[in-house]
Amino acid sequence: MTTLFDPIDLGAIHLKNRIVMAPLTRSRAIEGEVPNPLAVEYYAQRASVGLIISEATQISQSGQGYPNTPGLFTDAQVAGWKPITEAVHAKGGKIVAQLWHVGRISIPDYQPGGGQAVAPSAIAAVGNAMKRDFSMTPFEMPRALTVDEIQGIVGDYVHAAEQAKKAGFDGIEVHAANGYLIDQFLKDGSNQRDDSYGGSVENRSRFLLEVVAAVVAVWGADRVGVRLSPSNGANGSKDSDPASIFLHAAGALKPFGLSYLHLIEGEPGTPMDIKFGAPQLAADIRDAFGGSLMLNGGLMRETAEKALSEGRADLVSVGVPVLANPDVVERWKRNAPLNTPDKATFYGGGAKGYTDYPFLETAEA
């Protein structure tokens, strides 16, 4: 029986186990959206997992929507990421960059020249945005992208993919989940365009497929993954028929031969549990995609092992357990207690709650 501790090949990326560090926004970047030097230790501490997916990393200035999140569009940002990838590799780990554009989940504070956030359609997100000082303010109306601007953003993904290669990553993940720009195109609650990017499932998938084709040309398909969230209502995202659009998208991704598909589907009884009767689509999406499926959704050791044994996933990504336990692989192997996560330090701050979680040997001393 496959276990969490068995190796797996994700395309060209060989993993020593099937436990993946999920992308975790920590809001600790320094001026210029450059990774914090503390991130070198933070990521290296967690290199015993099979794969690290970097925190969501914006592809351009207009792609930012949260305070102190890193980018991959300037030379200074590349220089900030290089020692991180080198440190992870020195510990025998693998790391991919998650490429991100938040779309309408932004405010003028982050936009070039203080302009409007952009989106498929001029429909405001539900809820509040986080300002640079971490205070909250209601989302504002975004501006609908022109077709030419959409192609410009595809070009931004290409540039960021090239920058990720220069920074020494092992591959990239296209963030197409959680109500951000690509997800906004996929879901009809945020996409009400009447051109070739709106309406049918084929049209709403077009932007995703153009981005994937463009970054595959940079990296090769065997080093590119995609993250989707069909039933996740994050940031007010919604679709009237998630099964139709996401099964179509998964099937359309199949011919690329991607490294993996990363699917968010909350486990029952966890804070990520699917609400409001949204469909459980992971099994059907896995069949439609046909390649390696990474499952995410509040998993712990027992539920992660169950997902593998039931054939619902080939590997799993976990967030808080890795955040609070840099040696989570060893702890799960030994059924050892886990550290208590310090939620007050999840976003922003310094080393506290970032690089100071004890390893098992320290905790037992």
Image (cartoon, helix red, strand yellow):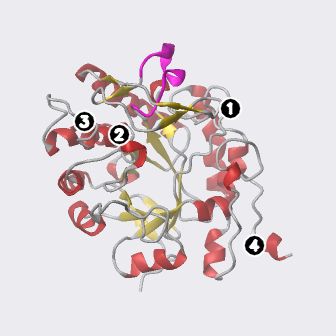
Which comes sooner in the sequence, label 4 or label 1? 1
Q: Which residue is mark 4?
A: 360
Q: Quadrant of the C terminus?
A: bottom right
Residues in magenta?
104-116
Question: Badge 2, how many Cα within 10 Å: few under 14, some, many 20+?
Answer: many
Q: Position of residue 147 (x, y in %)?
A: 23, 23
Which comes sooner in the sequence, label 2 or label 1? 1
Element at label 3: loop
Judge whether 73 appears above or below 250 on screen.
Answer: above
Question: Badge 1, how many Cα within 10 Å: few under 14, some, many 20+?
Answer: some
Q: Position of residue 184 (x, y in %)?
A: 31, 39
Discs 3/4, front: 3
Which comes sooner in the sequence, label 2 or label 4? 2
Judge whether 355 appears above or below 204 on screen.
Answer: below
Q: Looking at the picture, tell me which residue is in the foreground, 236 or 332.
A: 236
Judge whether 311 appears above or below 265 on screen.
Answer: below
**Visible residue check, residue 328:** yes
In screen coordinates, is 115 left or right of 345? left
For the point 44% across and 70% down, the residue is 8
Element at label 4: helix
Tag of residue 276 = none
Q: Which residue is mark 2?
A: 215
Q: Which residue is mark 3?
A: 191
Element at label 2: helix
Residue type at mark 2? Val
